[in-house]
């Protein structure tokens, strides 16, 4: 855990945290919002895709009559930069239990013209209105206790894959925003010994202690190092498309995130994430299609 | 296999088949297309969601500079009816290797006003340009040989779950368009003995013998009876959102489709599909979020 967070006597609360501050939108007119994308959520120089999804998810939560993203699909078009952005939403359909909306994030290019960065399509509902009935066959991942897992402070001492980005290195601002503790069995890549399995597992939280909510789940699914590292690939793995299903409101406390890749082929791979809360409930499922640079 | 198809001496070809005829679009103006949705792809009275996705996918293949859907996400808004419809597309971004587009399908309601049925967001590329490199850990599902699996003609003789739809019964027109042979180990629901596992597997093809292509994969992922049947749920399971990744151009011959559900909770479930071709390649992956009526 970053020193700033460790030293913190009181935990941040939902609505009053770094994550809430940096996803806060200012309504320009109905359905249109301004935001200053924070440089605090970058990996090297790229703004994290989960943070961007949370920004768009928050805009739709405001614009639609329902507040919780049940399923949200994002297509990443061009690389976002820290700085001013505008989010334009459209209400596609409103229903009793579900509403569907669309949102795009734009930034100005060097000529002052709007460039679209991401477009999302999403259906929202009310998680608290769902029946409590659960009949799942899914089981939480076997991750060692949090104190046996590796955090960013350890990663500074371990070798990074040649030519690859340093996702948990000090040069990535997002490392200071997150409590990320990697399962020792999925950090072989950092020791020059990738397992060859497309797996990555970690405990996940916000560094300032804010508890998870549905918007934080959008961040959680795209916050771990790519599974490609454990497959021995050390280049960038940019997301083409990411879809998240939020299945339940997460209980307070750290989340467990398990990511798997089955099919690396033709220069693309899928990353499937499952997110579990402290009550052993599967609170989110996601899948992304990403491009890989084979090394 | 339906009699009409069995009796056919020559196989239909890509571009000249029932599927091609019923997904054919007439361009009204650039990016806008008219289509008469066929009653031949209905389950009871509902137009099949995979057929509709193929219609939208074909519109985008025409409108975008790239022809193959790499990842396509659909949100189902209102129930489509057989009959006239219009598809409006928007080119969101064009790049060298990927282009992103959006499309919506509209029909007129009883007052003559346009109602949006489905909206999709998709990124297209060129499957034939991808490197041949494959490093997958995924393995094809163990489905018995096609002649040991159950087709629609057998389903007429087996009991259907009480209160549920009859997805492979003669009352569903789509059954005559498809070659669907269900794995005996996932047809317990039809015998009143659902396995309790969220699994459904089948051989899949077009009844007229047309070989699969990327658009047919969009149909294949949503053509099997819902996994919910094997979980003992007999009501409708309408799709909220369906995302398909097309990973490779399928080889000629029948496909194997494997669908799994891990998490039935709060009145929703996910259905994950994998589609394999005759060369044992994983040609498509999909996930949908569907609503369930618990019985």
Image: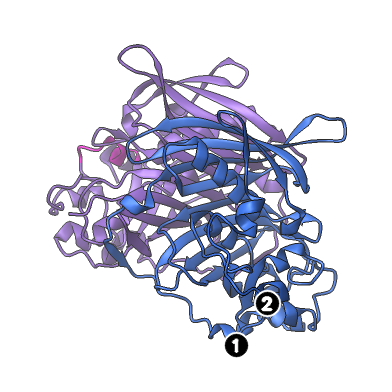
Chain colours: A purple, B blue
For image coordinates 71% across by 58% down, the residue present is B41
Could you tell me which quadrant the C terminus of chain A lies in?
bottom left
For image coordinates 24% across by 50% down, the residue present is A293
Q: Mark 1 lies on which chain?
A: B
According to the picture, the residue beneath numbered tag 1 turns out to be B148
Q: Which of B134 and A9 is in front in this view?
A: B134
Q: Which class describes the residues within 10 Å of circle 1: few (<14), some (14-19), or many (20+)?
A: few
x, y percent for residue B126: 38, 47
Helix, strand or loop status at disc 2: loop
Q: As displayed, is residue A62 above or below residue A66? A: above
Q: Please tell me the numbered disc located at residue A178.
A: none
Helix, strand or loop status at disc 1: helix
x, y percent for residue A102: 58, 33
Specify which label sits upstream in the sequence, 1 or 2: 2
Say whether residue B102 is magenta. Answer: no
Which span of residues is magenta-colored? A170-177
For image coordinates 20% across by 45% down, the residue present is A166
Residue B282 falls left or right of residue A277: left
Q: Which class describes the residues within 10 Å of circle 2: few (<14), some (14-19), or many (20+)?
A: few
x, y percent for residue A190: 18, 57
According to the picture, the residue beneath numbered tag 2 turns out to be B7
Query: Mark 1 to mark 2: distance in Å?
Result: 20 Å
Q: As displayed, is residue B110 above or below residue A195? A: above
Q: Which chain carries label 2?
A: B
Residue at the front extreme, as displayed: B9
Residue A15 falls left or right of residue B251: right
Residue at the top extreme, as displayed: A112
Say whether residue A175 is magenta. Answer: yes
């Amino acid at each position: 855990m970053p020193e700033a967070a460790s030293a913190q006597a009181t935990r941040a609360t939902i609505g009053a945290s770094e994550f809430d501050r940096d996803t806060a939108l200012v309504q320009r007119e109905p359905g249109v919002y301004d935001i200053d994308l924070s440089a605090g959520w970058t990996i090297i120089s790229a703004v994290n895709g989960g943070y961007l999804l949370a920004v768009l998810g928050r805009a739709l939560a405001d614009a639609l009559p329902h507040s919780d993203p049940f399923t949200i699909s994002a297509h990443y078009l061009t690389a976002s930069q820290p700085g001013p952005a505008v989010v334009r939403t459209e209400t596609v359909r409103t229903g009793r239990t579900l509403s569907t909306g669309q949102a795009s994030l734009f930034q100005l290019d060097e000529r002052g013209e709007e460039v679209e960065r991401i477009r999302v399509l999403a259906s929202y509902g009310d998680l608290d209105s769902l029946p409590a009935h659960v009949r799942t066959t899914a089981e939480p991942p076997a991750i060692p206790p949090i104190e046996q897992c590796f955090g960013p402070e350890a990663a500074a001492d371990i070798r990074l894959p040649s030519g690859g980005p340093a996702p948990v290195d000090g040069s990535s601002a997002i490392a200071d925003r997150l409590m990320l503790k990697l399962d020792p069995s999925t950090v072989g890549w950092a020791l020059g010994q990738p397992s060859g399995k497309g797996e990555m597992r970690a405990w996940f939280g916000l560094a300032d202690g804010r508890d998870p909510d549905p918007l934080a789940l959008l961040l959680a699914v795209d916050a771990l190092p790519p599974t490609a590292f454990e497959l021995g690939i050390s280049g960038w793995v940019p997301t083409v498309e990411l879809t998240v299903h939020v299945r339940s409101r997460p209980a307070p406390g750290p989340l467990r995130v398990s990511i798997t890749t089955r099919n690396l082929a033709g220069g693309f791979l899928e990353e499937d994430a499952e997110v579990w809360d402290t009550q052993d409930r599967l609170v989110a499922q996601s899948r992304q299609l990403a491009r890989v640079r084979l090394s």
